[in-house]
Amino acid sequence: MSTILDVARLAGVSTATVSRVINMPESVRENTRNKVLQAMEKCSYKYNSLARGFVTKRSNTIGLIIPNINNPVFAESTMGVQEHADKKNTRVILGNSYYKYSQEENLVKVLRESQIDGLIITTTNLKGNVLKNLVDEKFPFVLLFSTVKGGPFSAVGIDNYKGGYLATEHLVNLGHKRIGMVAGNFSMTDRSYHRWHGYKGCLRDSGLTYSKELLVQTDYSLSGGEASIKKLLCLPSPPTAVFCSNDYIALGALKGARDMGLTLPADLSIVGFDDMQTASYMVPALTTVHQPAYEMGRRAAEVLFQLIESPGKPLQDMMETNLIVRESTTAIPHTSSHQSRINKNQ
Amino acid sequence: MSTILDVARLAGVSTATVSRVINMPESVRENTRNKVLQAMEKCSYKYNSLARGFVTKRSNTIGLIIPNINNPVFAESTMGVQEHADKKNTRVILGNSYYKYSQEENLVKVLRESQIDGLIITTTNLKGNVLKNLVDEKFPFVLLFSTVKGGPFSAVGIDNYKGGYLATEHLVNLGHKRIGMVAGNFSMTDRSYHRWHGYKGCLRDSGLTYSKELLVQTDYSLSGGEASIKKLLCLPSPPTAVFCSNDYIALGALKGARDMGLTLPADLSIVGFDDMQTASYMVPALTTVHQPAYEMGRRAAEVLFQLIESPGKPLQDMMETNLIVRESTTAIPHTSSHQSRINKNQ
DNA sequence: CCTCCACATGTAAACGCTTACATTTCTATA
DNA sequence: TATAGAAATGTAAGCGTTTACATGTGGAGG
């Protein structure tokens, strides 16, 4: 493996000159530049950007921590950050936290040891020391899928309260009175928690009573959604509509409801959250709250580089969210067939 | 930012000793070890693994190039490689090639400059110079979702021919005579190409004639699947079953067919490929060829580390693939209602 | 043809760690 | 208690770049 020194010798110049043709080619006379280029060719020189990172204190690498790359929404946002990182000639190291704070903690440590220039993190726990330390040490990072507007860190996210409100409002407008929610575990992320608040807020504003039994928490999985919807439907007085705190859960719920013999959306309206790519391919096509995941990822990266290049005040960017109405929701049935059908199928 | 030297001074030992407590703690007397540990604490020392990489020539980082993290199958396999990389205390840098060879080429260059210890790549182009160079330079890498058994590189994959065969055979056994295929563009990947060969092979073995019009190529997208199935169904003599070369395409096809007024699977059987997590949540639940994506990712990482730790002959691992029969396929209808229904709905 | 200045190139230290080798300190045994 | 040998620690070079600073060179203007 040849180095800059080999090249220099071969070309009869100094290492500084070689370095210059690599980093600022215009600053060296065409003549010498060509000599160097040829020499590089001849000894099939390969640049070592790790060595550069070592001296410049810039690794041209950022970290990206998400709960789970398996979830299309996170995959989407990952692509967004990658696109911008690419533009900035920066590599991204990916880590999954699996919604575990300890894992997050460890990843941050490892990534920082790797001398990443900055970090994008979709955190599970806002209150932990991880973020606090990052802030204290003025390490450049941005929260992705953040729920907070103020606060001492940069963040891009959406208004989850509003999202939950929008979803619920839609159901209320369709005449539903008994509206359930299956939410991601509040202990796993507060996004779900805020959506639930939106849901409750809307219920209150609409004069509907909220009852505890109408909420069931689960992990963010297909099977979780499936099991949870069954719980709701087995209630003595089951909901006629349910708001699921993400599309994955909703997809599970769709199946669970179908398995219990319901026809959708006639017997049960379902609205999701995220608007992942396949939402419109579900049966029925899923009504859901849109979250611009790709865009958010890209924006997070933009913000991060701004922070890296000129440290300063934290930047916050809350993006628009809106309801996409498709076919999984419909007006409440006028007959009581719904109730009886469920009971028949239990 | 304090360094090993600061710690050493503070603890009254040499840098070598500090390095030892970091890397082989048992080799230093408890007494001194504690002094060092305390010193680290006191000056809130942070290890710089980039510097280590620089001297040891091991960055503890590997590269992972896939076509698109958006595709759940690749996401799944990514998690597999991450799991094993974690165990090996190694970071993974992710790159999307978007099925573009030029992008692949560039990523490999950039990653190698970053001094990755090895590379896992799901390539778009077996014949390009990228792989050839890697081989020539004895750089450790493994092909993921590989289609080749022999050859000068390590690889883990499945038998795509067999997969295509299995899918088609299933349809033949159900009595279908006119079986279409919507395939990923052959120019994008040869996986699809091999599956098509399996399809053709089975047709031949079953005494069915293959006709060119029954194949339509598309990109690996939902909308691609949707559009392609419509093309097939608009044929003068449309197929009664179609094999889609991945589940994403199949999901699109399901929707396309439904939109044309067909009821599934009665009017049209569809089988996919991959068996992504949501396959059993589709409507109808998708019959598909299972590919152990997570397992493959993990295996690829295992192989890679073997290669890194003790270079030697290329290792190949072809994993099992099998058909999962669900609800999107059924015996061919006996009436001619199928044909007329299509025509009615055009 | 000289001078001066801008521009091109060279010199050498520095980055934070590891490690081969040298030296010191223990420990156990005679 | 002396001593050999093992165990712990220290010394210093080296990894492949960048970069501040010093030096050298070319060409325009006098």
Image (cartoon, coloured by chain):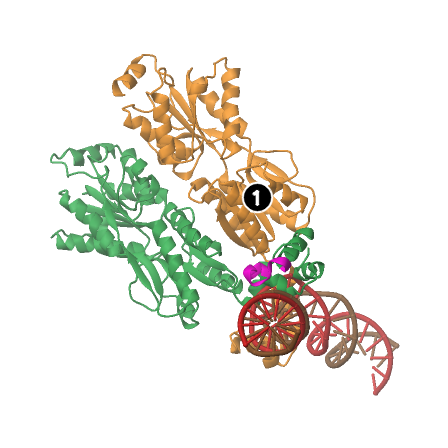
Chain colours: A orange, B green, C red, D brown
**Residue B31, magenta (yes or no):** yes
- Residue B201 point in image, percent of width and height: 18, 56
* Residue A22, quarter of picture: bottom right
Q: Is residue B339 left or right of residue A210?
A: left
Q: Is residue A66 left or right of residue B217?
A: right
Q: Is residue A128 above or below residue C18?
A: above
Q: Is residue B15 left or right of residue A223?
A: right
- Residue C9 point in image, percent of width and height: 69, 77
**Residue B15, magenta (yes or no):** no
Residue in front for this viewpoint, B18 or C6: B18
Numbered disc total: 1
Q: Which range is magenta? A: B21-32
- Residue A212 point in image, percent of width and height: 45, 19
The chief SS type of the magenta part is helix
Q: Is residue B83 left or right of residue A155?
A: left
In the picture of the structure, the residue carrying the numbered disc 1 is A300
Q: Is residue A211 above or below residue A149?
A: above
Q: Secondary structure at mark 1?
A: helix
- Residue found at x 52% / y 24%: A198
